[in-house]
Image: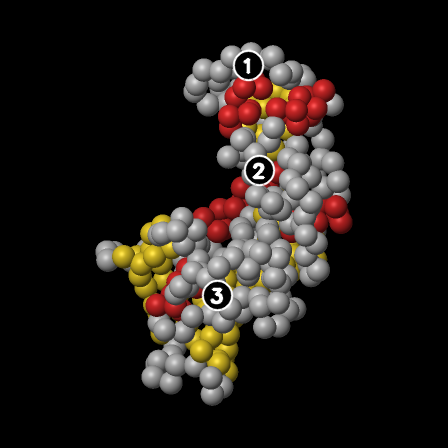
Amino acid sequence: MAQSSPLPARLPAPLPVIDGVAPSYLWLPVGEWPNLLAFLIQRFPAIDSATWVARMARGEVVDGNGLCLMPDSPYRRGMCIFYYREPPAETPIPFEETILYRDERILVADKPHFLPMIPSGRFLHETLLVRLKKKTGLADLTPIHRLDRETAGVVLFSHDIGSRGAYQSLFQQRLVDKTYEALAPTAPDLVLPLVYRSRMVEGTPFFRMQEVAGEPNSETRIELIERCETCSLYRLRPLTGKKHQLRVHLAALGIPIINDTFYPDVYPCKGDDLSTPLKLLAREIAFVDPLDGRPRRFTSQREL
């Protein structure tokens, strides 16, 4: 699939951000095609040739130097091409994000449930990144870490290319304290707090993770905030950052997060049904700012 992540600073996009949407880009792979159009039709079977021809006629498919590419342009492996995604009409997501903090380097947002982080699949304008770009006009806005579409809460963004790597390193070196909250069934026999560790790998279907035997590569501290008869509120502190880690760990303990449609069992896709959000919230992130040494702490204002 084409990349929707930011380009390296040394390779700026030759097309502008339009209505909060940056151009997508794609490095042409090894292969033989008679021209660029033939490649694009094969690479993106859901987009017909007439659509690509129209995009090219509007000057919306270009190379790294901003030169317009035509249907009969020769295919050159290793070349980077740029274009705008045009997904079908999106269903509006009726939940608003809020900006918790902004300075000359970073922005911190409070994401609602159901809102995807970045453009992907059928989502483009209805994503946190594009919404924030429209609100702020920050063309270089990029998430430093990500939350699942189903998860709400605090997310850190960078909008200064020069300092971005310093903030990314915080997460890579596990120097960020992350605290989540989850509503899940009450487990009277579960002794808390506890630290749960397991080895997680990609599972089946492709979008799920699974636990297997072997040296643990995921670790979560689990505490009880409030116990009720059937449902309790838990505090989760992940010490690693595996995909779906919190969802997998609570399901393995017999207390799957309420409204989780992936774990322990996969349920049919709910489509545009927004009535039953996953009861998981990224409550807080805290770290020492790598640029000025100040302690930073940002807390979600949302409730489960």
Residue placed under numbered mark 1 in the picture: 35
Q: Are marks 3 and 2 in contact (CB under 8 Å)?
A: no
174, above or below 53, in the image: below
Identify the disc placed on residue 4: 2
Give the foreground label among 3 and 2: 3
Give the image location of residue 289, x and y in percent.
57, 53
Q: Earlier in the sequence, mark 3 or mark 2?
A: 2
Q: Is residue 158 visible?
A: no
Give amino acid for label 1: Asn
Picture quadrant where residue 165 is located = top right
Camera-side residue: 98 or 67? 67
Task: Give the left or right position of residue 137, taking residue 175 as reference.
Answer: right
Label 3's element? loop
81, above or below 255, in the image: above
**Which quadrant: the C terminus?**
bottom right
Task: Give the left or right position of residue 107, taking residue 179 as reference.
Answer: right
**Residue drawn 69% across the image and 61% down it:** 95
Label 2's element? loop
Give amino acid for label 2: Ser
**Residue drawn 39% across the image and 65% down it:** 264
Camera-side residue: 80 or 57? 57
Identify the disc placed on residue 260: 3
Could you give the CA–CA distance between mark 3 and mark 2, rounded to whole angstroms?
27 Å
